[in-house]
Image (cartoon, rainbow, N blue to C red):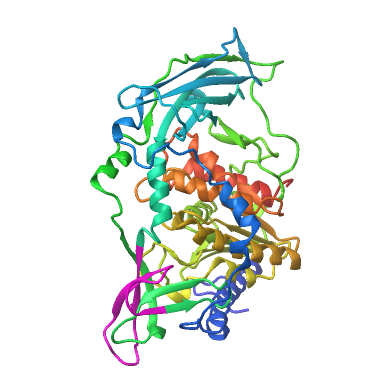
């Protein structure tokens, strides 16, 4: 056996690791090359067949999930909109003492900017019960009585001093505005397509692209695997086939000055004052904190309400026996021999980044692609672990990226053989809130078909869905995200998939809400994910 340059013979384990790494890089690159070479090109100007699902009773039932109480008038003056500062909540059905296992009820009365009681519902509220000293919290349930009053319900899951916090995310008038904009505009964001013909040596042309036709002569691209459409304004000096790169364009200004007031910091994301005192919760039969049920976590379980809570900064599932993985050795032991495919947006890329940082022996393989859109690859050769992440396809707000690297999520699933050592986790939502709902529903429908086919050919494949994060307030809206998240959950209900309830995990933590949450939240999300991968190890 040859010696290394420093005079030592490489161990068999080192040789095995080097061979594994080289093999995985070759497989990863050759697989994508095979797809690009052998998949049929997207036809230009083709017409896809009508999708029966878009006219189905299921779709009509899904759209019923989007129902939200609306103001009695289409346009309401800001003075008549809900004011967080003028609204108030109080304790309902006060008890002499509270114990673990009881419920805490709170009544909230909404008032407008002039302090007058509201007589209709539709406000988007977020409530939580928390104990800052214990780093414990749980999201509350909001019942809208559609008359300006609301009942907030909180389960008492731990002993100690607890307090209520309620915020007005959006007034009912703001929600109506968001809904009107979503439903009346084909998009509120644009994208850029970059046309290049290296053989001709001509200059790059940049045109506007989107999920719908743009003004003027248009290039139409139809994906043969999913039937999804993509449109770009036709370049003057290139053919439609010369589309090489993609990036975010601009956000459209669709709000008037008067409408912007409803979404300003003075009206949205505001704390509502209340008169509920700090309450001392007592143990119940020596039970000081609720625990997860003994049922192992497995795909197909329906989420409970609430799905879990934080206690000492650890998420405790109320639906199954959640596990924690506090050390890198435990996480690596769970993932040994697994090929993990992560497909989605930057909130899922945070999981990939967390595992890369958390497990020192996992190494990033630089594929020389645009990082924000991927694909990204990391391996742990000694334990046979492969971690992949890539974006879910257009529409995608990202930096300049090769179109060939941006694959539709359903196509990725169709290309997987599956198996007991394969884990697929995906998320889809935040990049779709700038379009009418039907764009999202159509996409999720194609993904659901791909998931069903993957499970049919390989039932042992583990499939996990990450729900939406809260905290998207700069270019997005949590109300729009919630609407899409409800559709996602409904469309996968009853299937053998697991759902990590990131919505709950990001909505009640003490860290400020952010679409890209802090490390402690990401770690809890990953723990929940690993609980489905390794329920009993």
Viewer-side residue, 167 vs 157:
167
Q: Is residue 494 magenta?
A: no
In the rendered structure, the answer to whether residue 1 lies left or right of residue 536 reads left
Viewer-side residue, 335 vs 288:
288
Residue 252, percent across and down?
30, 58
Q: Identify the residue at the far bottom of this view.
A: 200
Residue 518 visible in the displayed image: no
The answer to which quarter of the image holds residue 326 is top right
Picture layout, residue 182 above or below residue 150? below
Residue 535, percent across and down?
71, 46
Picture layout, residue 227 above or below residue 253? below
The answer to which quarter of the image holds residue 38 is bottom right
Q: Identify the residue at the far top of this view.
A: 96
Number of marks in the image? 0
Question: What residue span does the magenta drawing correspond to?
Answer: 190-219
Q: Identify the residue at the far left of this view.
A: 257
Q: Residue at x 30, y 24 (%)?
A: 114
Q: Is residue 205 magenta?
A: yes
Q: Identify the residue at the far front of this view.
A: 73
The answer to which quarter of the image holds residue 463 is bottom right
- Quadrant including the N terminus: bottom right
Viewer-side residue, 358 vs 56:
56
Picture layout, residue 107 above or below residue 512? above
In the rendered structure, the answer to whether residue 438 lies left or right of residue 181 reads right
In the rendered structure, the answer to whether residue 427 lies left or right of residue 302 reads left
Q: Residue at x 51, y 64 (%)?
A: 392
């Amino acid at each position: 056996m040859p010696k290394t340059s420093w005079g030592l013979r490489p161990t068999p384990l080192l040789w095995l690791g080097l061979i594994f790494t080289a093999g995985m890089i070759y497989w990863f690159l050759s697989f994508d090359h095979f797809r690009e070479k052998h998949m049929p090109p997207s036809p230009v100007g083709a017409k896809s067949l009508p999708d029966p699902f878009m006219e189905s009773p299921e779709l009509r039932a899904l759209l019923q999930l989007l129902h939200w109480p609306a103001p009695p008038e289409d346009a309401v003056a800001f003075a008549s909109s809900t004011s967080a500062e003028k609204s108030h909540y109080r304790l309902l059905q006060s008890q002499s003492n509270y114990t673990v296992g009881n419920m805490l009820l709170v009544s909230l009365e909404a008032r407008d900017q002039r302090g007058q009681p509201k007589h209709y519902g539709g406000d988007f509220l977020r409530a939580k019960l928390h104990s800052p000293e214990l780093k414990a919290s749980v999201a509350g349930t909001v019942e809208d009585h559609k008359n300006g009053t609301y009942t907030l319900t909180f389960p008492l899951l731990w002993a100690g001093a607890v307090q209520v916090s309620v915020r007005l995310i959006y007034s009912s008038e703001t929600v109506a505005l968001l809904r009107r904009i979503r439903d009346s505009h084909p998009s509120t964001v644009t994208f850029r397509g970059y046309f290049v013909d290296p053989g001709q040596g001509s200059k790059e042309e940049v045109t506007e692209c989107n999920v719908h036709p743009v003004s003027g002569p248009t290039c139409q691209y139809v994906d043969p695997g999913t039937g999804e459409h993509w449109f770009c304004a036709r370049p003057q000096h290139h053919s439609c086939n010369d589309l090489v790169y993609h990036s975010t364009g601009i956000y459209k200004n669709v709000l008037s000055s008067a409408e912007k007031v409803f979404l300003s910091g003075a009206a949205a994301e505001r704390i509502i004052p209340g008169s509920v005192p700090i309450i001392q919760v007592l143990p119940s039969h020596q039970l000081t904190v609720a625990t997860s049920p003994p049922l192992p976590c497995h795909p197909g379980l329906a989420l409970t309400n609430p799905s879990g809570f934080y206690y000492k900064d650890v998420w405790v599932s109320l639906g199954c026996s959640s596990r924690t993985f506090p050390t890198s050795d435990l996480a690596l032991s769970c993932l040994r021999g697994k090929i993990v495919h992560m497909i989605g947006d930057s909130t899922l890329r945070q999981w990939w980044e967390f595992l890369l940082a958390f497990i020192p022996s996992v190494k990033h393989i630089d594929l020389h692609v645009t990082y924000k859109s991927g694909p990204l690859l990391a391996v742990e050769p000694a334990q046979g672990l492969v971690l992949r992440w890539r974006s879910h396809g257009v529409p995608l707000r990202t930096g300049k990226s090769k179109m060939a690297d941006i694959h539709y999520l359903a196509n990725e699933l169709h290309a997987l053989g599956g198996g007991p050592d394969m884990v697929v986790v995906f998320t889809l939502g935040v990049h779709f809130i700038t379009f009418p709902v039907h764009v999202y529903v159509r996409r999720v429908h194609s993904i659901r078909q791909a998931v069903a086919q993957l499970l049919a050919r390989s039932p042992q494949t583990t499939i996990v869905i990450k729900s939406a994060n809260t905290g998207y307030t700069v270019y997005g809206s949590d109300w729009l995200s919630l609407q899409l998240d409800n559709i996602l959950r409904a469309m996968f209900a009853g299937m053998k998939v697991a759902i990590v309830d990131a919505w709950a995990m990001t909505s009640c933590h003490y860290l400020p809400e952010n679409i890209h949450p802090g490390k402690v939240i990401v770690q809890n999300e990953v723990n929940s994910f690993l609980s489905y991968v390794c329920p009993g190890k």
